Amino acid sequence: MEKEALFEIMNANPAVHLATVEDGEPRVRAVFLYSAGADGIIFHVGKVKDVYRQIAANPSAELCFNDYARGVQVRARGKLEEITDPAFKDRIANTPGREFLKKWRESGELADFYDKVRVFTLKNGRAHAWTMDKNFAPKEWITL
């Protein structure tokens, strides 16, 4: 599978599971993908959340996307990098489907929106696609 096909699956299935490590133990939770493409696999989390502290302590992570309709799972791994640009956070908050962020930013409900919302990208990592028909085949890693 080509890199662009992997990004297509990711963008079509924005509920992604993120695995991090805390005190040598794995932690997994769902996060909401912003986008996947040439700029990396981008998502946001709250600074007050455990996941933020886990990423800050160890930026190595794995993301797992599931396209149940096509029977494909895509797993991507690498080091997460933080995007701190306030204009980029504004762009995310103004994206359809992210109305909750826009509300938090504009209402002041989330004090210091630009500090509390943290954006990460996984780029320069690697990914592979899994399907049942290739269940026992060696993984074919693709550089992102």
Image (spheres, helix red, strand yellow):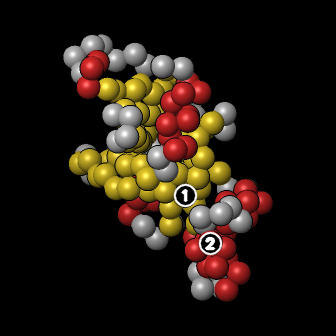
C-beta proximity under 8 Å, tags 2 and 1:
no
Residue beneath the point at 51% across and 66% down: 47
User: Front-most of 127 and 98?
Assistant: 98
Residue 106: percent from left, percent from top: 71, 81
Q: How many marks?
A: 2
User: Front-most of 82 and 93?
Assistant: 93
Residue beneath the point at 29% across and 52% down: 27
Q: What residue occupies the far right of the structure in this picture?
A: 87
Residue 44: percent from left, percent from top: 54, 58
Which is closer to the viewer, label 2 or label 1? 2
Residue beneath the point at 58% across and 41% down: 36
Residue beneath the point at 37% across and 40% down: 69
Q: Secondary structure at mark 2?
A: helix
- In this rendering, the answer to whether 23 lies above or below 8 is below
- In this rendering, the answer to whether 69 lies above or below 53 is above
Q: Residues within 10 Å of mark 2 (few under 14, many from 20)?
A: few
> Which amino acid is tagged 1?
His
- In this rendering, the answer to whether 17 lies above or below 132 is below
Q: What residue occupies the far top of the structure in this picture?
A: 138
Residue 144: percent from left, percent from top: 56, 27
Which quarter of the picture shows residue 77? top left
User: Front-most of 105 and 134?
Assistant: 134
Residue wearing tag 1: 44
Q: Secondary structure at mark 1?
A: strand
Q: What residue occupies the far front of the structure in this picture?
A: 69
Q: Residues within 10 Å of mark 1 (few under 14, many from 20)?
A: some
Q: Is residue 55 visible?
A: no
> Which amino acid is tagged 2?
Glu
Report the side of 124 relative to 65 (left or right).
Answer: right
Residue wearing tag 2: 99
Q: Is residue 21 visible?
A: yes
Residue 117: percent from left, percent from top: 58, 66
